[in-house]
Image (cartoon, grey):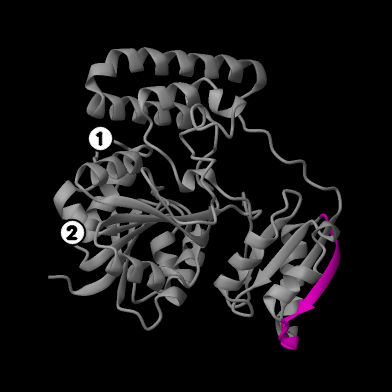
Amino acid sequence: MYETKLSVVIVNYNVKYLLEQCLRSVQAATNGFDAEIWVVDNASTDGSIEYLRPRFPDVRFIENTDNPGFARANNQALRICRGEYVLLLNPDTIVGDSLRTLCYFMDGCSDAGAIGVKMIDGRGAFLPESKRSFPSPWVAFCKLFGLSKLFPRSRRYAAYSLPYLSPDKQHEVEVLSGAFMLLRHEALDRVGLFDESFFMYGEDIDLSYRIVLGGYKNYYIPERILHYKGESTAYADKKYLNAFYDAMLIFYRKHYPQSGRWMSGLIGASVGLRKGIARLFGWKKPKTPKPKRRSVLIFCRAEALKTAKDRVAEQLPEAVIFRQWDLDERRAIDALSRRVRMNEYTDMVFCYPDMTFDQMLLFMDRNTDKSCVYHMYYPDSGQLISPGR
């Protein structure tokens, strides 16, 4: 029935260097595996297609002449992809070697409709949207009016992000993130594709909900990926806020019609409150202060050091201290993790392929520090990928 084991679908909009990095990691993870990769470009103006097509000749590109939104763009590829399993992946992600393991999990767990994973950000911190519960009216009330932040460990008030479930253990959960969602194609055939009423947010919640209604289960598996979390979208600007709450209104009108008017009023009040706060304190999420002096540790082999150092100095003019962890010495990454003292450095640079993506993710997960930023350097293209850039 299916012509390949895995189809990977990525929707792109003006993030060609992040997508290049993502495609590198996907190709490394699927090397020797029965997989196909689809990229749907939503009318990018940064030359994404022209830049990426010659670099990834095996990737199938779909070029849109306008931006139809995340849900509709994914559906374009979902209707023609041929995999038994389908991975929906954001372009601002890096995956390790776990894709085969996750497919094997699906093979052995026939009730699994979808799988999500442990997402970490550019500083190695766990992203709570990796595992969530359905936003029932009560759960939504607690989230919208801040009760979940006041009682972050409470099963009653903080149920949305399931903080009482360990991020390092497997769980059956209700909602998975559209940034990484491994789906059983058969489940999609049964419950349907993304609801195209959702333009940019909420479609993953809706699909997760329908998968469970269809008789399947959603699983959280603690395999690591990096997710820069909306590098192409400002976190708390007006458009984001309005789009997010519009998506929630669509969800409630669709799945909780008896609560539609009540939830519309609740969400409207929440939006008004957030906008009032924004007028007083500004829209932007507070940023971590940039250090005046940066100390940088570069993980690379000897031949890559000079170009890496030059590129870092160009992009981070505050850098005054450079040190190298020489990967030619073949020291194990876990030993490296124990020996490197994080507080000595403001920035760490991983050179690929001197370090594998799996090694990068392992190191970041074991060494979470809000004061340290991780960067990825690619000597063959000269690209230095940093959070927020």
Residue bounds of the magenta highlight: 318-331
How busy is the neighbourhood of tag 2: few (under 14 within 10 Å), some, or many (20 plus)?
some
**Residue 326 located within the stretch drawn in magenta:** yes
Question: Residue 311 at what x, y percent from top left?
Answer: 71, 67
Question: Residue 97 at what x, y percent from top left?
Answer: 47, 73
The three-letter code of the residue at mark 2 reads Glu
Residue holding disc 1: 197
Residue visible at 80% across and 75% down in the picture: 324
Residue holding disc 2: 186
Q: Nearer the viewer, residue 340 or 244?
A: 340
The three-letter code of the residue at mark 1 reads Ser
Q: Nearer the viewer, residue 270 or 38?
A: 270
Identify the element where label 2 is drawn: helix
Q: Is residue 329 visible?
A: yes
| Horizontal side of residue 219 vs 336, given as left or right | left
- The picture quadrant where one finds residue 382 is bottom right
